[in-house]
Each structure stands twice: as C-alpha cells, then as structure tokens.
Image: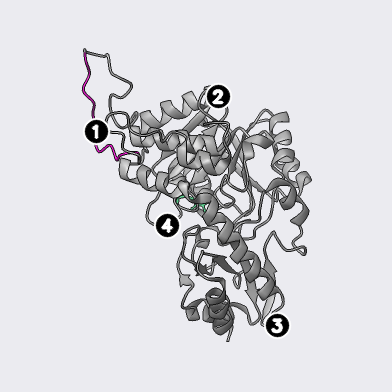
Amino acid sequence: MTEERFETRAIHVGQEPEPITGAVVTPIFATSTYAQPAPGEHTGYEYSRTDNPTRTALQTALASLEGVNPGDSGGCIATSSGLAATGVIGYMLKPGDHVVLPNDAYGGTYRLFAQVFTQHGIAISAADMTDLDSLRAQILPETKLVWVETPTNPMLRIIDIAAVTEIGHAAGALVCVDNTFASPYLQQPLSFGADIVLHSTTKYLGGHSDTVGGALITGSDELLTQFRFLQNATGPVPGPFDAFLVLRGIKTLAVRMDRHQANAATIARFLEDDARVDRVIYPGLEAHPNHALAKRQMLGFGGMLSFIPKGGIEAARRVTSATEVFILAESLGGVESLIEVPALMTHMSVDGTDLEVPSDLIRLSVGIEHIDDLITDLDRALG
Ligand SMILES: *Cc1c(COP(=O)(O)O)cnc(C)c1O
C-alpha cells in the first residue's frame, strides 16, 4: 500500500480491516489496559498511555502522509493537542539551549516558548525567516532548534524550508516545521530535509472542528524513540475517540483541501479587485512577495487568507461582526468558513512583541461551502 498515491494512502495505510471481525473502519479501542498471556509478555499493547490500537492506526496513517511509510525509519506520535506536541519537543531541550522562532509563529507556540520554556533556562529569539540573513544573525553556538512555520499565521509569509534547514543543520540544530496550515497534502517538509514535522490535527487533518489533537512526525528512529519515551513519561496522549475522529478526517483531506483552496483563490481575487479592501494576503496571488517560493515548495496555496479592509480597526470589527455564513471564531481548517481579527482574538498573546500583527487585519479560514454564498456574504459584510 505504501507505493500508492496520497489519496489512497490516506484511506488505507494503518487502516487495514480489523483482524477479528473484519470491521472496515478502525474501531475505537476504549480500553486502558490489555490482558497479558504471562507476566510481562504483552501482545504489543500493555497500557493505553504507552500505546492504543486506534492511536497506532492514526500514527501510521499520519506518518505515511508525511512520506514516512511502514518499514521506513522514523514514525509518528499523535498527541492530545498541537501544543502538547510542542511540549514534547520542549522536554527534549536543556537549560542553556537556544531556539529560533519565526517572527509570526502561531501565538500559542510563542506563548509556550516565551512564557514556559524560558522559565526552565531555554533562551529564544525571533527571526524574519523570509530573510535568511535575519535568521543567520539569530543563530548562536547554543542554538539547538530552529522552528519553522510556513505559511505563517496570520501574515501568510512563506519560509524556504530547504534553505532554513541548511542553515539550521550547519549550526548543529534540529529543524522542526509546523505544517498545520498547509497540511501534508500541500507540503511535506521532511522531503526538504526537515527533522521533525508538527501538526495541530485540530485543523485541516481533523477537518471538522470537532476534536483537538496534535502530532509529531520524523524520519529518524532516534528522534522517534525520544518522542515515544517522552510521551509515555509525561502523558500527553489523545484518547481513542479523538484518534478515531482525526483518522476519519484524514480520509477526506485531499478532496477537502482541493475545495478549500479553490474557494480561497476565488475569494482572494474578489477581494483584490474590491475598492473597499486595502490589501489581500494570499500566497496564490502573483502579487504575494513569496509567490514563486510557494509555487516551488507547495502543491497548492491552501485555504487561509488574510486581508485589511479600508477604514482601520473599526472596519475590521464591523465586517467580522456582519458576516452570516463566515462564523466569527478562532481556529481554522474545518469545513465551515471562519472569520476573525487576530490582533483581538488569536494573537492577543503576542501583543507588544516581535510577533505583533496589524490591528485591522482580518483572517479567513475559507471553508468548503458554495463559493457564491461565501462571496455574497463577504460582499454584504463589507457594506
Ligand atoms: C492551532 C495551531 C497550533 C496549536 O494546536 P492546538 O491543537 O490548538 O494545541 C499550532 N500551530 C498552528 C499553526 C496552529 O494553527
């Protein structure tokens, strides 16, 4: 099955019919413990913090989507949230270590590094990673980790994964790419040399805004062993029902992403031509400063889009309160379209830092509703 294409692997890898009953869908193994034939002689499962079959199926499938197939070195751990996955990486760092983050990382990632890990002796700095010299300037002898997020949130800058990885590796640092915004359907960071891929499966992978989860994927057996040890030692595991929901979500990832990005591209062009809009940020637009890189590094431009309406923060408040199909809410990547003002909602924690975002910026997570209804809604809300 590992020779098959992405769409096929998403539905089948790790998800063979269940051997006892032939159930076509991986069951929710709601159990904490497993009978052992003799003391210490378990059959691969002993306790569900360590392993659970529903979670194993999800991990095998997620790894395959990032290019790590059964039999390859490396693998995946599924975690209780995206930030729990970041937490596992934090446990690998030691006092004195230094980490470089992108200057518009996900707000929660920044908060975890800046307000928690720094309390344990980890030093951080932020770089504009679209400018490789800015990244080089932040590298120190103690730099152990370079964190990449691309497209960035909410400015949708595109970072060159291969180039950043080269700089990180030359400094002896690991490179971790948060691939949540693109999803593995559009971008596979391990293929550009990255060491670790992180996902918030809450977003496109789950795809239905009905569960919170995360994952780490690596092509290295050594890193996988560390992840598995740290996850078992510290406990951030998803329950089997959450693993089931993400597993169900990824089966339709390809068709959903196709529609997400087709809708987003149409909306980007609509807003770009509209006199009530000051600026549209979408990597698929030729006017986007990183458009050529996005074309090279991604298989599509994704479903996230940001724009600045004319009229400042008051206009941003008015538009986001006036939409009816677009729901005013945090998060992204679900089938339903969402609208938000990052500076007032998701990015409060980066206020006054290097990561501050324009106060009048509106972020859209474009869903898979009918495009005409989405355009009509935005047109009316713009007033
Ligand atoms: C949501 C998100 C996270 C955090 O994931 P949770 O599942 O909410 O913990 C990390 N990175 C990005 C890019 C995200 O969008």
Residue 256 drawn above or below residue 6? below
Q: Of the two numbered discs 4 and 1 on the same chain, state the one appearing first in sequence.
A: 1
Q: Which mark is residue 275?
A: 3
**Count of numbered circles in the view:** 4
Q: Of the two numbered discs 1 and 2 on the same chain, state the one appearing first in sequence.
A: 1
User: In the depicted view, which residue is nearer to us: 101 or 353?
Assistant: 101
Q: Of the two numbered discs 3 and 2 on the same chain, state the one appearing first in sequence.
A: 2
State the CA–CA distance, disc 2 to disc 4: 30 Å
Q: Is mark 1 within 8 Å of ligand 1?
A: no
Residue 275 in the image: x percent, y percent?
70, 83
Residue 46 in the image: x percent, y percent?
28, 24
Residue furthest to the bottom in view is 383
Span colored in magenta: 26-37
Q: Answer yes or no: do the residues labelled 4 and 1 have beta carbons within 8 Å? A: no
Label 1 sits on what residue type?
Answer: Ser
Label 4 sits on what residue type?
Answer: His
Q: Residue at x 57, y 38 (%)?
A: 66
Q: Of the two numbered discs 1 and 3 on the same chain, state the one appearing first in sequence.
A: 1
